[in-house]
Image: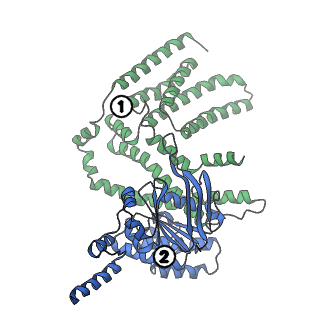
């Protein structure tokens, strides 16, 4: 029992979350999805991120969901991301089902709800696949290629990169509170509640030094970028060309696009024959 | 007879979370004893396990095997709040220690929280000791590198810990500030029984430590005094350590072991007098 509770506590620790974020950003570079060109992935996402919203056939949505799930498996997504995905999708539709039962509904609500669930799940899995397969630099290059403003693509990539750093800093500040603070005495019937309040309090307090630290860090980053001539590079087409010169479509990209196309066409065909 | 143990590792195994499938091991069956009163320097290349060892001592990381004792009490599965009565950690980045609104507030924080009597006067004493007078009402994040480091040392010893852990206390400091920090480190020995420093700074090791532990790939590659380590060419080459320049210079010029500029200057003057006498 103690081992189980330790295991659960470990899974909600900041260190675990930080590792999972790092794993998602940098730990999946050897997967078949990560080997694809970022432009292929973004184009693929453009389809799988929008098309499910306009489809209402359960069979078609189910087939698309299966395909998105297969690509997510190939992308070796971090377990925490999958957990958050499941929590989000099933809590959303689960509460709608419960609410419908309260208002005199019955289990037939499951069919319309499953349409919504499959839409949300397919789009979410496609997002997870694409953003797990792209590290910050590749994501930035892909967005830049499709005309996304340089500042925006850089901001997205930078945020992705800085997140684990901030988490580590937050963890250290929290440790500072823990080493120097005073936990409530382990006595009395309200100890658990007092301890919970103490933990919440130090978590909240840790954000204040973190924000000040981040402000200082951001200034250093901006100064470093300015020194490297970042602002000038934004308006220079030659810089853009050099930045994107490494992008290449490979056989794998064509194969992935072809399989996606054939599968989607096949799914549309099958769904037109089978009705649920 | 050895003095009582301040820190004791018995067959400790630890790993860190990897971003690939497997968690890399840092220590596999590590045994280590640090006695009360020792000033220990942990050295080794990046990833050797220096910072992890410090985090194990203060309970930030839990080992998956073995036992850890601090001041005779087993702390293997204890929380940092519980180890804090014996141990204090001064971070590599002092900014992460500043949780108060001012330097004075930060130094007082731990004593105030633990309701230590006369904490105000004790904080003032520390402010004097670390030459922070006049800065006590300033936000610690706005101080210079050396001032921040001194403030972090004052915060670290505020509770008079039995074991003080310091992670890279002289990293990113200029020579003058580094000298200031080394002086401060020497002066805090009256406030703490045992101090352990993880560092790459060999000048700090030479000037401050009386025991040096060399970590390499999660194992203790060597354990001895500064001169023993600096003379062990096999270890130096294996771990990639370079003795401080003053040591190498002293050895090349006079064939003697000089650990700090003062020793070198004394030797130089003595040699000069001998040459002049001839």
Label 2 lies in what chain?
Answer: B
Residue B66 visible to an observer of this rendering: yes
Tell me whether circle 1 and circle 2 mark residues in contact (CB < 8 Å). Answer: no
Q: Check disc 2 and report the residue beneath it.
A: B137
A60, B261: nearer the viewer: B261
**Figure colour of chain B:** blue
Q: Image point 32% across, 43% down: which residue?
A: A150
Mark 1 Cα-neighbour bin, 10 Å: few <14, some 14–19, many ≥20: many
For chain A, what colour was chosen? green
Which residue occupies the foreground of this view, B183 or B71? Answer: B71
> Could you tell me residue B10's position as x and y percent?
60, 58
Do circles 1 and 2 both sit on a common chain? no
Q: Position of residue B142 (x, y in %)?
A: 42, 69
- Residue extending farthest front: B278
- The subunit carrying tag 1 is A
Q: As rendered, which of A36 and B211 lies closer to the eye?
A: B211
* Residue at disc 2, secondary structure: loop
The residue sitting at the right extreme is A189
Q: Residue at x 48, y 14 (%)?
A: A266
| Quadrant in which the C terminus of chain A appears | top right
Q: Where residue A39 is drawn, which disc sits there?
A: 1
């Amino acid at each position: 029992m103690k081992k189980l509770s330790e295991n659960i506590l470990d899974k909600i620790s900041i260190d675990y979350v930080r590792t999972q974020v790092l794993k998602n950003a940098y730990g999946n570079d050897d997967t078949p999805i990560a080997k694809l060109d970022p432009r292929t992935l973004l184009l693929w996402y453009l389809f799988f991120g929008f098309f499910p919203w306009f489809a209402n056939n359960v069979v078609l949505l189910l087939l698309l969901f299966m395909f998105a799930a297969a690509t997510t498996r190939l992308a070796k997504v971090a377990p925490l991301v999958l957990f958050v995905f499941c929590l989000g999708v099933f809590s959303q539709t689960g509460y709608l089902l419960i609410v419908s039962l309260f208002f005199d509904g019955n289990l037939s609500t499951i069919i319309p709800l499953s349409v919504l669930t499959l839409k949300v799940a397919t789009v979410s899995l496609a997002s997870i696949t694409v953003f797990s397969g792209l590290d910050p630099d590749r994501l930035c290059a892909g967005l830049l290629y499709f005309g996304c403003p340089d500042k925006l693509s850089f901001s997205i990539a930078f945020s992705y990169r800085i997140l684990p750093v901030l988490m580590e800093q937050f963890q250290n500040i929290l440790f500072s509170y823990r080493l120097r603070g005073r936990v409530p005495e382990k006595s009395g019937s309200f100890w658990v509640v007092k301890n919970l309040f103490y933990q919440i309090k130090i978590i909240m307090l840790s954000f204040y030094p973190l924000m000040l630290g981040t402000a200082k860090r951001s200034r250093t980053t901006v100064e470093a970028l300015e020194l490297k001539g970042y602002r000038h590079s934004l308006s220079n087409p030659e810089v853009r060309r050099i930045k994107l010169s490494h992008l290449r479509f490979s056989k794998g990209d064509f194969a992935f696009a072809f399989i996606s196309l054939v599968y989607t066409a096949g799914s549309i065909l099958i769904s037109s024959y089978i009705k649920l | 007879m050895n003095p009582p143990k301040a820190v004791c590792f018995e067959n400790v195994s630890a790993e860190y979370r990897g971003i690939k499938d497997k968690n890399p091991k840092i220590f596999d069956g590590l045994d280590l004893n640090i006695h009360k009163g020792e000033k220990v320097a942990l050295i080794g290349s990046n990833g050797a396990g220096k910072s992890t060892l410090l985090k194990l001592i203060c309970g930030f990381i839990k080992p998956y095997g073995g036992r850890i004792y601090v001041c005779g009490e087993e702390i293997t599965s204890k929380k940092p709040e519980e180890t804090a009565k014996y141990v204090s950690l001064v971070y590599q980045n002092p900014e992460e220690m500043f949780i108060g609104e001012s330097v004075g507030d930060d130094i007082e924080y731990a004593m105030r929280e633990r309701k230590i009597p006369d904490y105000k006067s004790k904080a003032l004493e520390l402010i004097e000791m670390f030459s922070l007078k006049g800065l006590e009402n300033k936000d610690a994040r706005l101080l210079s590198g050396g001032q921040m480091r001194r403030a972090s040392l004052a915060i670290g010893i505020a509770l008079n810990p039995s074991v003080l852990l310091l992670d890279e206390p002289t990293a990113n400091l200029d020579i003058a500030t580094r000298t200031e920090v080394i002086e401060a480190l020497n002066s805090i020995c009256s406030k703490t029984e045992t101090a352990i420093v993880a560092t790459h700074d060999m000048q700090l090791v030479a000037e401050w430590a009386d025991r040096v532990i060399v970590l390499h790939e999660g194992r203790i590659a060597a354990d001895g005094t500064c001169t023993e380590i600096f003379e062990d060419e096999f270890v130096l080459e294996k771990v990639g350590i370079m003795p401080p320049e003053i040591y190498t210079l002293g050895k090349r010029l006079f064939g003697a072991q000089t650990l700090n500029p003062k020793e070198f200057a004394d030797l130089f003057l003595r040699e000069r007098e001998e040459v002049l006498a001839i």
